[in-house]
Image: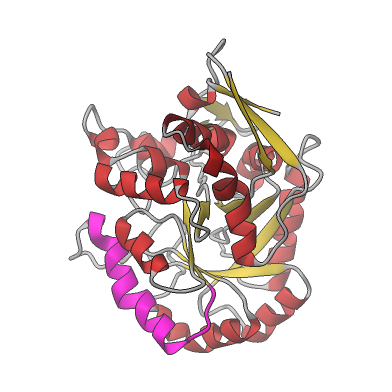
Amino acid sequence: MTSITVATPDDWHVHLRDDHMLTAVAPFTANSFRYALVMPNLVPPITSMAMAREYRDRIVAAAGPDARSDFTPLMGLYLNDDLVIEDLLAGVAAGVVFAVKYYPAGATTNSEAGGASLIGYQSVLEAMAEAGIPLLVHAESTDPDIDIFDREAAFLETELTPACDAVPGLTVTVEHISTRSGLDFVAAHDGFAGSITPHHLTCDRSDVLANGLRPDLYCKPVINSREERDALAAAAMSGNPSFFVGTDSAPHPLSHKETGRAKPGIFNAPYALEVIAELFHQNRALDQLESFLSLNGPTHYGLPVADSTITLTRAEPTQTRPEMITTSGGVEVRIFGAEAAALWTIS
């Protein structure tokens, strides 16, 4: 039996959706994490302080009676033409808004309202840099001429680098890094950081394609090669303070995944901690688990580390873990990571 106690983890990238889906999935995040950095890509997107406050209230209500007492949603605004700089600054000053998220239009789920060019929002970026507001970036080119496995590198070169050169002082998180290009970009910029998901840490494209197509593993950015996966895992387990967990937990109805045109997104919130713990255990890196889960993220964002703790214990499984949830509306959602979760308990 193996046991490790760490400061309570934070999730620096999560999709909680809305309505009956929010009610079904929010408790999993609220039971496991202290801070949850909530993505704003609803329909319509969250673009104002008022919308962020109302969404935060819905999240807190949906978290349920078993939510951690210190569970705190951190709200992002969606960067598009509807965002008003004065409202953004007021939202941050009021403690309602935490960050701003940029989606290239059409890159992923509910990104149709995103931007055609990051540098096109230079005035917003300059205000953010001056106020120290974090910029969260979905780093994926939407150029159809670029191979899907190369789109992270292309975005970093053609979109994010020019924006950072034009607006020095930005606080940037490259979200859900999927390649060595993302790791190298963060390493080359002081003060920048990157979040990494459980599925990009533990899966490669052979898992998606080799033994029958796995639509449950389809996400954006796509899961890449084994070499990229190994590089991400090495970075996560290195103790490098620039990298931390962002689950990118993104629930979709099963009917939207197992269909002719699957939606991108993996729902991993229920077992994210267990999946990561198993990876670190298998690589004899449990001594670095707390850094990745609990220390690096709050340090990057200038927030205190949790003063509460959780204990993860590994033992031979005595029962399987559920692979599906069903919302109050009768919608089934598949959960990622049940096999690893069967090996761990959390208290």
> Residue at image x 25%, y 46%?
227
Number of numbered discs present?
A: 0
Instruction: State the quadrant of the N terminus.
Output: top right
Q: Nearer the viewer, residue 200 or 138?
A: 200
Viewer can see residue 275: yes
Residue nearest the viewer, comparing 242 with 125: 242
Residue 292 position within the rendered picture, expressed as x and y whole percent measured from the top left: 54, 49
**Image coordinates for residue 187, horizontal then vertical, percent:** 40, 66
Q: Residue 254: name its quadrant.
A: top left
Q: Is residue 225 visible?
A: no
In the rendered structure, which segment of residues is drawn in magenta?
A: 148-171
**207 on left or right of 198:** left
- In the rendered view, how is the structure colored? secondary structure
Q: Is residue 69 above or below residue 156?
A: above
- Image coords of residue 47 (percent x, y): 61, 71
Q: Is residue 67 left or right of residue 142?
A: right
In the image as oriented, which residue stretches furthest toward the top? 318
Residue 257 belongs to the span the image colors magenta: no
Q: Residue at image x 29%, y 33%?
A: 207
- At horizontal 47% and vertical 36% (from top left) the residue drawn is 280
Decide: is 320 above or below 17: above
In which quarter of the view is residue 128 placed? bottom right
Main SS type for the magenta part?
helix
Looking at the picture, tell me which residue is in the foreground, 209 or 238: 238
Residue 259 appears at what percent x and percent y? 34, 36
Q: Is residue 155 magenta?
A: yes
Between 208 and 287, the residue placed more toward the observer is 287
Q: Quadrant of residue 205?
A: top left
2 to 239, vertically: above or below: above
For the C terminus, the image quarter is top right
Q: Is residue 301 left or right of residue 164?
A: right
